[in-house]
Amino acid sequence: MSHARASAAAFAAAFLFGCAPPGPKPEQTADAIYTGGDIVTVNDKMPTAEAVAVKDGKILAVGSKADVEKAHKGAATKSVDLGGKTLMPSFIDAHSHYINSLLVANQCKLYAPPAGPGKDVPSILAELRKFAADRKIAKGEMVMAYGYDDTVMPDGRLLNRDDLDAAFPDNPVRVDHVSMHGAVMNSLALKKYGIGAATKTPPGGVIVRKPGTQEPYGLIMETAFLPVVEKAGAMTPAQEIEWTKAGQMLYAEAGITTAQEGATHLPQVQTMKRATVAGANVIDVVAYPFITDVDNVLKEIPLSAWGTYDKHFKIGGVKITMDGSPQGKTAAFTTPYLAGGPGGEKGWKGEPTFPQDMANAMVKKVYGMGVPLTLHCNGDASIDGFLKAYELARAGDFTKPWNVTTIHTQFMRKDQIPKFVQYKVRPSFYTLHTYYFAEAHIANRGKEQAAYISPMRDAIDAGLRPTNHTDFVVAPLDQMFMLWSAVNRVSRAGAVIGADQRVTPMEGLKAMTIWAAEQYGEENRKGSIEPGKLADLVVLDRNPLKVDKMAIKDVKVLETIKEGRTIYRAK
Ligand SMILES: [Zn+2]
C-alpha cells in the first residue's frame, strides 16, 4: 500500500468512526514494548532485534523499533526502556532438585567462594550468627544451613561441634555438607537426632569423633546421616505454600522460569500437587518420578494427565538412576579408578545402581508408557548400560519418536556420541565439574579422561543439541557461572580442563534456553524470543555474548519475567 493510499484510508477510517486515534487493532496492541538495549533472541533466523512486543503473556512481535511500534503501539502500551541492558529468553533448568529449594530457601547459605561466604570456620560462624539475627530465630529453634564445603577449609581446620556450641549454646544447629550426604551439628542438634558417643558407626557411614574420645565432633555422613534425614519432619500445609514461594524465588533470582524436580518420590509429588492447587507456583515446575515410585505416582496423577501443565506444574516423565558420582567413586566405569575404591578396593570400577537385566526392564517399561525418560549416567560403563537397555527396549525399531535425556553424561566416551546421534538421545552435561571437581577427577580418572568430561564441543559438532545443568543444590543455582564454565572450562585451581571441548557463548546459551526447551518438548512455546512463544524473559546487566569470556560469570540477572509478568527484580 502506497503512503498516499494509507493516509487516505486512515482519513476515511477516522471520518467513519469518529475521533478514534489511529493505532493498531486491539488484538494487535501490545501490553508492553521493550526497546533500548541488546535483544538476544536465541533464534538463528533473527539473532538480534531492536524491539519486542508482548501481549497477554506471549511474544506478539520481534523486529525493528520502527516496525514494532508502528504495528503494535497503542495508547495503553507500556514502553519499557531497557536502558542499555540485555533482554533474553529466560533460562530453562535442564536438571536440578527443585524440591530441595523449598528447604534451603529457609536455610543459611554457606557455599565456598565465589558462590558463598564459606571460606573458613570464622566466616561460617559469622554468617550463621547474621542469619539467625536477621531471621530473629528464637532460643531453642533450629538453625539450618547448607553448602558447607570442607575441601576448601584452610590448613585442614574443619568446622566442628565445639565451634557451633560456642556460637549457639541455646539453639540446635545443623550445617549440611555441600554433597547433601552429611552434616556437622552442635550438641543440641546431635541430641535431637539421637546421635552420641554410644552411637556405633554403621557400615557405609562416617561419624567423625573428637580426638581421644567417642564424642561425635564433626561430619556425619552417608548411612550414618540417613536417620537425620528420616527424622526431619514433614512440612505443615502452610509451610508447603510459603516454602514453595520462597524456593521458586531462588530460581526466579537466577533468571530461571522452568525448573526441574529431577528425582521425585510420591510424598514430594503430593507436596507439589498441594502447593499447585493452592496457587503457589510462579514458575513452571516439571517433575520426574523415580522409576521405583512410578506406580505410586500413577495412583495420584494418572498417565493421561502427565505432560500437561496444570497451574504451572506437570509430570515430565520418568527418572532412572544408572550409577553414582565420579567424585564419590560410585560412578560405573569400564576401567578402574586410579586411586582405588571408596573403601580402598583395588581395581575398583564402580557399580551400576541396578543389575543390567533390571535396568533393561525399567527402560522398557518407560518406553511402553510412551513418556519421556531421563537417566542419571556419569561413568562410561553406565552409558554403555543405558545404550544396551535402550536398544533392547526399541527392539530394532527406531522410527517412533521418544524423548530421552541422559543427565550428567560426564564421562561419555567419544565413540558413544554417534549412538546418541543415531538414536536422537539428548545428553545433558554438567560443565560446572570442570570448575568444582576437576582436581578430584584428575586424581581418580587421570588427566585425559578428566579433560574430556562433559564433551559439549564434540557433541555439538556431531549434530547433538545438548543441555547444561547445575544439579542444584549440589552446585549453586547460578546460570551465568554455568555458562562461564562451558565457555572457559577453568578449574578452581586455575587449570584449563579440556580446551578442545569449550563451546561458544551462543552455544552455551542455547544449552540453557532453546535446547533445554526441546528437552521438555516445549520448543514451540519456550526457549527463544519469537512471536507466539511465552513472554518468559530475563534482563541482564550486560550482554554475555559481548563481554570478555572470563567475565561471563559476573553478568547479573536484573529482572525475570514469566509470561509477561515481572516475578523478580534485583534490589
Ligand atoms: Zn541430580
Image: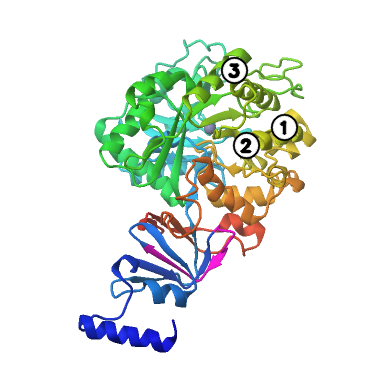
Look at the numbered disc 2 and give the secondary structure of its residue: loop
Q: Amino acid at mark 2?
A: Lys
Which residue is under mark 1?
416
Q: Magenta part of the protein: which range?
A: 42-54
Of labels 2 and 1, earlier in sequence is: 1
In the current view of this chain or complex, which residue is farthest to the bottom? Answer: 4
Q: How is the image coloured?
A: rainbow
Q: Amino acid at mark 3?
A: Asn
- Nearer the observer, 428 or 75: 75
Q: Nearer the viewer, mark 2 or mark 1?
A: 2
Q: Let me know if residue 323 appears in the view.
A: no
**Residue 322 image point, x, y percent:** 59, 23
Residue 250, placed above or below residue 439: below
Q: CA distance from mark 2 to mark 1?
A: 12 Å
Q: CA distance from mark 3 to mark 1?
A: 18 Å
Please rate how many residues cluster around mark 3, counting C-alpha atoms within 10 Å: few if below 14, some from 14 to 19, many from 20.
many
**Residue 83 image point, x, y percent:** 46, 72
Quadrant occupied by the C terminus: bottom left
**Residue 217 image point, x, y percent:** 51, 23
Q: Contact, CB < 8 Å: mark 2 with mark 3?
A: no
Q: Nearer the viewer, mark 2 or mark 3?
A: 2
**What residue lies at 73% left-to-right and 36% top-to-bottom?**
450
Q: Is residue 329 left or right of residue 8?
A: right
Quadrant occupied by the N terminus: bottom left
Which residue is under mark 3?
360
Q: Contact, CB < 8 Å: mark 2 with mark 1?
A: no
